[in-house]
Image (cartoon, rainbow, N blue to C red):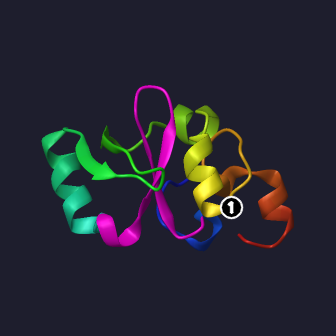
Amino acid sequence: MTGYPIPANYGHWWLATSRRLHAVTEDALTREALDDVLDDNAPVVRTTVCGRALALRVGSLGDRLGARRCVDCCVGLDVPGGYGTPANEAAIRQEGWL
């Protein structure tokens, strides 16, 4: 249920807008920068894999489990489309990524 850049998430952060989860490279957002944003309860503006500069936030549990992933981010990473973070996909778990 994590949006952190772990191998099962293809090494990318999965952060939320009001409608979608978007992928952000680990280089574009350090854990320290994310902690600062969390402390301020404000969105962080970063360029996503799909090339958009968006105000993003750490998704809620509901987002990480059920928000639709950005199709363009998925295509850019060769990630199957779907809902929630890739780490939550049963197919990925069955392939031994977790």
The three-letter code of the residue at mark 1 reads Asp
- Which residue position is annotated with label 1? 78
- Give residue 95's position: percent from left, percent from top: 84, 69
Q: Position of residue 8 (x, y in %)?
A: 64, 66
The reply to whether the magenta stretch includes residue 2 is: no
The quarter of the picture where residue 86 lies is: bottom right
Which quadrant, please, contains the C terminus?
Answer: bottom right
Picture coordinates of residue 81 (x, y %)?
A: 71, 45
The image shows residue 28 at horizontal and vertical percentages of: 31, 66
The reply to whether the magenta stretch includes residue 25 is yes
Q: Who's the residue at 24% across and 40% down the image? A: 43
Say left or right for 16 vs 54: right
Task: State the image quarter where residue 59 is shown.
Answer: top left
Q: Is residue 49 above or below residue 21?
A: below
Q: Toward the viewer: 8 or 70?
A: 70
Above or below 88: residue 67: above
Q: Which residues are magenta?
A: 10-28
